[in-house]
Amino acid sequence: MPDLIAQGPRMSDRWRRTLPAGGDGDGPAPSVCIGRVEGTWQVEWDDRISREHARVTLQSDGRVLVQRLPSGRNPIFHFGQRSDRFVLAAGEHFVIGRTTFTLANRPAVSSDSDDAVGVTEHAYDRAMLRRQGFRDAPRRIDVLGRLPDLIAGSSNDNELLVRVAGVLLQATPDASAVAILQVVQNKTAPPTTPPNAPDDGDESKSDQDDVSSTAGDEVRVLHYDTRLADRPGPSPSARLARRAVRAGESVLHLWSGRSRKDDAPAGTAYTASEDVDWAFCVPIPSDACRGWALYVTGQLGVHGGVRLEQSLQAAPTDLQDDVKFTELVATTLGNLRQVRSLQRRQAGLRRFFAPVVMDALATRDADEVLEPREADVSVLFCDLRGFSRRSEQASDQLLDLLTRVSEALGVMTRHILDRDGVVGDFHGDAAMGFWGWPLDQADAPGRACRAALAINDEFLTAATGANRPMSGFRCGIGIATGRAVAGRIGTIDQVKVTAFGPVVNLASRLEGMTRPLAAEILIDEPTATFVRHSVPPTVARVRRLLRVRPAGFQSAIDVCQLLPPAGPQSPLSDEDLGQYEAALDALILGRWDEAFAALHEVPTADRAKDFLTATIARHGRVAPPGWDGVIDLPKN
């Protein structure tokens, strides 16, 4: 996998990034921009590089096309010559300003057989490392002090890994390379020993079994960086990575197998693996980095007069500071990704849970918050009018229709959520929301009514604009207040946060009555009582519409209409509403002729009066025998 390495005038001025691979061949290959602004592969240390200087594109043959952009002020040098467009092969480089860019292939992890020979292993006790102080405390503390801001400033995981590798290389002088690895457990690999095999007390055999049992686990290189760009870096040890992640502790490997070159001075030692005497691997203790580990490898500081064996013996102690520092970096990285994971999870949950639910989840245990319980709630049902007709007309444009319906449902849910409600469910082209859970809301009826008025107002406004996605749609809304069970409700296979109970059924029935009663918003008496006493008439008005006995109901209910203040959206004055209620009182008392005359005093713009007028006319303006003031409403 090709990487591009940028190296500035100082050792700390560098990064190594993986070039994005090509697509499926149908479109242009992905490319990256080298520059000094956000969204580019930034080279902050070099002011000779323009804000957007060059574009780099990985080709199918592994080479890279480099092109200078028109905004790149300074030239690009390739093989010492100015060039605005050229192809770069692995091991080659180009220069912009004071920065050298080198193309290098990332080494794969080594095989188990290659790195298992001549290895001395040392495991570090995490608690012991924490008790030990740094021998070079000022320098380590300075780096650690800058670490949280340095890592937290990364915009994505790729940038995060680049910065982590850079920190480790800077803080570990003897390191030749740094890698961030991931050990992916192979769940299908058979165990190497019987699961109930007896323990014969041979510790070396037990350790070997532990290692070999993970041999099928895949080791991936998430990021890799080396100190020198002009030579291939050492391959990470798969065996060491598996061992550290399996044990959950930092593990050091020392390569004691040596060879001597014929032309080398006597006493000069060479590692069995080029440029590498040691490597340690530190697992990252975080569920957000499952199987991840930081891998650091380098050479022993063997000086004149000091035998190799002495250096090998002292290595675990000499490298202790580096291991401890890497563990702190691992913890910081794990915590940061855990926080980011929780933030992403919370953002994802906001698509399903209302903000009021998310706020409760942030401070209390999720099982406690979502546990179903009885609560006083106000339930709103909102149904889309005109969907069936539109679907017939747009049978050849169903995707467009779906977009428009989604827009309409979005209006409903947005206004429910804006007033701290919970979206409980969707029923085709209808939405259900409720208030009063998970937190008690004394003003739940008022919140539901404000949401209903806002929804209706937006639909009425959209109906006048032919180019609006919701044009041609209207809505009917029903609201009821009462006792219900709310919370996490469902089966093992499917769970949702919603409410159920008679009050939910009533809200649904009220919504269904909006069509025959020609009223956009219908509410029950408890909701109406709250509005009369607690909501200013400049926000909402209420009138009694009629007493009905819906199909399937034993008892009669008082149905009220929720109206906005008198104005463009409601041409009815308060006097008009009073005149209608006077007609309703006469109707309930059996004085139907009087009620009929009173209804004719209500403006014709009031479509809701038509239902009572038609009912009275159908009975010849005479109350039927046994009249009890209740109109039986057939099922739609």
Image (cartoon, helix red, strand yellow):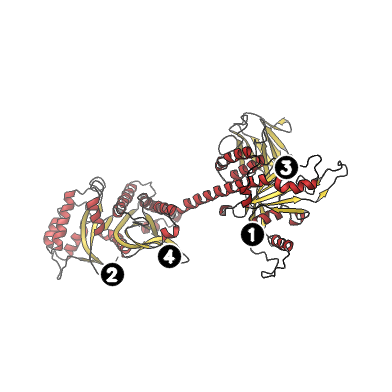
In the displayed structure, would residue 135 be above or below residue 192? above
Q: Nearer the viewer, residue 202 or 37?
A: 202
Counting residues from the start of the chain, the first of labels 2 and 4 encountered is: 4
Q: Give coordinates of residue 349: x percent, y percent.
A: 46, 54
Q: Nearer the viewer, residue 327 or 608?
A: 327
Q: Secondary structure at mark 3?
A: loop
Q: CA distance from mark 2 to mark 4?
A: 25 Å
Q: Give coordinates of residue 122: x percent, y percent.
A: 71, 53
* Residue positioned 43% across, 52% down in the render: 363
Q: CA distance from mark 1 to mark 4?
A: 34 Å
Which kind of residue does numbered mark 3 sit on? Ala
Q: Which mark is residue 185?
A: 1
Nearer mark to the viewer, of 4 and 3: 4
State yes or no: discs 1 and 2 in contact (Cβ < 8 Å): no
Residue at which label 4 appears? 490
Q: Give coordinates of residue 119: x percent, y percent.
A: 76, 53
Residue at which label 2 appears? 552
